[in-house]
Image (cartoon, coloured by chain):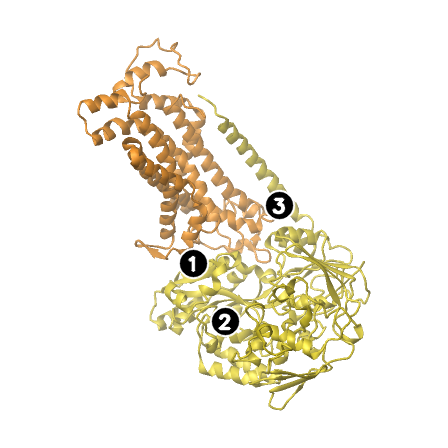
Amino acid sequence: MLKSSQRRIAAGALLAAATMVVTTACGGGSGDNGGGKGKAGAAGFNAAVNKVANASDKKGGELKFIGSQEADNWDPQRGYYGFVWDFARYYTRQLVTFKAEPGAASTELVPDLATDAGKVSDDGLTYTFTLKDGITWEDGKPITSKDIKYGIERIWAQDVISGGPIYLQQVLDPKGEYKGPYKDTAADKLGLKAIETPDDKTIIFKLPVANGDFLQMLAMPAASPVRQDKDTKAKYGLKPFSSGPYKWESYTPNKSIKLVRNDKWDAKTDTVRKALPDRISVTFTTNADDMDNRLVEGEYDLDINATGVGAAARQKVLQQHKDNVDNPQTGFIRYAVFPQTVIPNIECRKAIIYAADSKSLQTARGGPQAGGDIASNMLPPALKGADAKYDPYGKLAGAPDLAKAKEALKKCGKPDGFKTTIAVRNNKKIEIATAESLQQSLKAVGIDAQIDQFDGAQTSGIIGSPKVVKEKGYGIIIMGWGADFPTGQGFLQPLVDGRFILQSGNNNFSELNDKAVNGLFDQALKETDPTKAGELYKQINTKVSEAAVYLPFTHEKNIIWRSSRLTNVYTADAYNGRYDYASLGVVK
Amino acid sequence: MTAPLHETSAGEATATVDGAPDAPGTPDNSGASKAIEGRSPWKIAWTRLKRDKLALAGAFVVVFLILVAIFAPVIVGLLGHPPDEFHEDQIDPLFGTPIGSWGGVSSDFLFGVEPVNGRDVFSRIVYGARISLLVAFLAAVFAVFLGTVLGVIAGYFGGWVDAALSRVMDVMLAFPQLLFTIALVSVLPNEFLGLDGSGVRIAALVLVIGFFGWPYVGRIVRGQTLSLRNREYVEAAQSLGAGRFYILRRELLPNLLAPIMVYATLMIPTNILTEAALSFLGAGVKPPTASWGQMLSTAITTYESDPLFMVIPGLAIFITVLAFNLFGDGVRDALDPKGSR
C-alpha cells in the first residue's frame, strides 16, 4: 500500500509522545530530592507574619516587584485593588493612615498629613484636622487643605474618575447633590459643601449622618490630595503627582514602573513611611508560573499582587525554600451562599450546611496552607467582634454531619433530598473544584446539585442580579469576599444588610433582609468606640449564622514569597495580610 | 474507464485493479493466473484493507476503544472505583497532590488519582472515552447526513441551487466555530429538549460540531456528483426514462458511498479533537462528568508536581486520534487505490 507522509509523521509523533512521557516524568521526580534549607539570609517560615523579619534602617538599593496583574488604575482615586492601596503610599499621603506595625496593630490609624487623628464633635458629625508644617509636593510647593479637598472631590466625577471606592461620596453627600469638580461652577472648583477649608492648614468634614468608620475612609488612597494644576483627569493614573517619598520616573502600562526618591519629601513630617530603597521598580508579566520561577531564582524580590504562589510552584517552594515563605491570612472568606428566593426553607439550607464536608472543601481550596483554615462563621478573625471558635453547625470538626442533615431534610419536608444548582465562575479552577466537592458531599444525603459555570467576567449581571439568580434556580452560589477596610461594616454590610440588595452588581446574594440585622448595623455605624462596635458586629454575625444562608469554607491564607534581600518585612492586617510596602527595604 | 464501484461494471474493474499485492496503484497482472472470479468492489476493498497492517492495528484499537466505552461500567466495576468518588485519603492535604509516587499509581488506582480530590484517573479515562466517542460519532453521522443530502442536491441539480448551497458552504467554512460554540454553550439553558445536566451539553456538542462539519462532506459529495451525473450510465438511465430521484438513489448514491465512508472515518478523529478542545476551554460536558479535555485542563495547575495526570489524558486523546486516522487512511486506500495526496 501507499505509505503516505502523514503516516510517517504519525509514527514520529508517537515516538515523540513516548519521549515526552519519560522526560516529564523524570522532571517531576527530581522535585523530591531537594528538601534543603533556604538560601542564606532567608528569615525562616512565617518569619514576617505578624512580626518584623530582618529589621533594618539601612537605606539604598533597588526594591524589585514583579506582578502578573496590572493595577486597575494607579490614580489614587480610581484604584480598587488591595495591592494598589498598599503601593499607593509610596507616592500619596493621607490625613490619617495605618500604623507601621505588624499584624493586628497595623489597623490602628495614626496621623499622616494631619497633626492628630482629627477632632470629632460630640454628635460625631464634624471632623476637624490641622495639617502639619513642611509637607510638600514633589515640586516643593506645600500641600494645602484645598489640595486634599480637591482630591476627594474627584471621587464625585464618576464619569471620568471611575472604578475607585465611593464610600466618601456616600457618607458626605448621600443625596448626590454635588456634581464633581469637572462640572463645578465655583471658580476654585471647590463647591463640595460637606468639606470646608477655612485656611490652607485646616480642613473640616461635615457628615449628614454619623459613621464610626469615617476615619477608615479617610485612610484610603481615595482621600489623597491631588493638585488642581497637575490633575490630568482620566490620564492621572499614568503619572500621579507625588506627595509621598517616591515620585514616578517612568511607566509603561502592562510592562514596568520605575519610582525614584522624591527629594522634597521630608522624613521628619512622616512617622509611617520608612523610604529605605533608593529606587522601586515593578515588572509585569502575563505568565504567573514564570513569575513564581523568577521569584524563586532571586531575580525579583516579591509579587506585588501577593495573591500567593501558584499551584504549579507550590510544592517546590514549600519543600525546598520554606524559609523564604510566609503564610498569612488574607482576611478573605471563601464561602457558599444560598439565595432565599430559590431555597426559601431554612431547614433545607441547614441540610446543605450539615452535609458539606469542610475538610474536603478546604482541600479543594488548596489545603490548610495555600487554602486556609476551616471557617465556621462569617467574620474574618482579624476584625473586631470576630470569634473563630463560634461554630453553630459543627464545621470545625471537618466532617459532614449526615444525621443532622437528614433530620433537617425531614423538617424541610424533603426527606429524600432535592434538586438544586450550584453557580460557579468558569474562570476560577479552585472554585470549580470546591463546587465539585460540595456536589459530591451533598449527594450522600440525596441533594442533587447540578454545577452551572457562568462567565466570570459577567458576575455582576448574572449572580449580581436577583432576577437572573431566581430564573436560573441558583440555590448555591460560590464566592469569596474581603473587606475594603478592617471593620465589620467594611466586611459584612454589603453581604447581609437588606438595604444593600441591588438589581445589578448585588453582593447580598442570600437577599437576607432582616430588620434586626439592619438595625444593628445602624447602631454599629454610629458607635465610635471600635470595641463596642465589635460587640454589635458579633451579634450581627450570630444572627446571620442562625439564618443559615452562608456556608463558609475557609479563612483564606496565601503562600507568599519573601526574597532573602528584603529587610524590614512584616505582614499587615490593614493590607489584607500583604507586607506593608512602605516599610520594606533591601540589602544591596 | 468505468467507475470502479458501479455494480454493473464491477467485473471489469476487478480484472484491472485487483491483484496488486505490493505495488499499490500500479496495475499488475502477474497474479492473475488464478481463475478470474467475480468479486464485489467491497470484497476487493476488504482484501486490500486486510493487507494493510497499520490500518488493521488502527482498526483493532478503534474496536477496543468502542468496547471500552460500551462496557465502561463493567470495566470500572472490576478494575476501578466509581468515576465521581472522592478519595481524599490518597491526597497530601498540604499540596493537593497524590501521596503515592507517579501520581498515586498503585494496584488499587491503575492510572493514579486526580490531584485535590483523589478521583480514580483510570475510571475517568474509561468514562471519558464514552463522551469522546459518543460525541465524535454522532457529530460525524449528523455532518455526513447533512453534507450528503445537500451536496447531492447541489451537484445534481446545479444552477442556482448549486450556487446558493455552495455559498452557504463557503460561509459555514469561514465561520469561527470554536468561538461560536463557547458563546452558545454559555447561554444554553440547563434543561432543554427534555434533557438535563450533561445530556444538554452532549446534545449541544453533537449539533454544533456536526453542523459545522457538513460543508466539508458537502463539497466533496457535490464535486463527485457533478462528475458522475454526466457519465454514460447515468445518461443511459435517463434515456430509459428513469426519474430524477431514481437516478439519485440507484445510480449516484452507491457510487458516492466510498468517498462518504472515507470522509466519515477521517472526520471522527477531528471531532474527537474538537470535543477535547471545547472541554479544555470549559465548553464541554459539565462536571463531574469525566472528559479527556477537561482532565487536561485540570492538569495544567499541577503539571510540575504531578506530570502523569497530564500525560494520561493526553495519551488517551493521542492514541484514539492516531488509531482513527490510521484506520481512516486504510479505508481510503482500500476503497480508492488511485487516490493520493
Q: Which residue is mark 2?
A: A394
Which three-letter amino acid code belongs to the residue tagged 3?
A: Gly
Distance Cα–Cα, label 1 vs label 3? 32 Å
> Element under label 2?
loop
Q: Which residue is mark 1?
A: A451
Residue B257 picture quarter: top left
Distance Cα–Cα, label 2 vs label 1? 26 Å
Does the CB distance between marks 1 and 3 fall below 8 Å? Answer: no
Instruction: Name the front one of labels 2 and 1.
Output: 1
Which three-letter amino acid code belongs to the residue tagged 2?
A: Gly
Crowd class of label 2 (few under 14; some 14 to 19; many from 20; radius 10 Å): some
Q: Which residue is mark 3?
A: A28
**Chain shown in yellow:** A
Q: Quadrant of the N terminus of chain B?
A: top left
Crowd class of label 3 (few under 14; some 14 to 19; many from 20; radius 10 Å): some
Q: Looking at the picture, how far across and down is residue B38, in whole percent? A: 28, 16
Can residue A485 be seen here? The reply is no
Q: Looking at the picture, how far across and down is residue A210, in whole percent? A: 57, 85
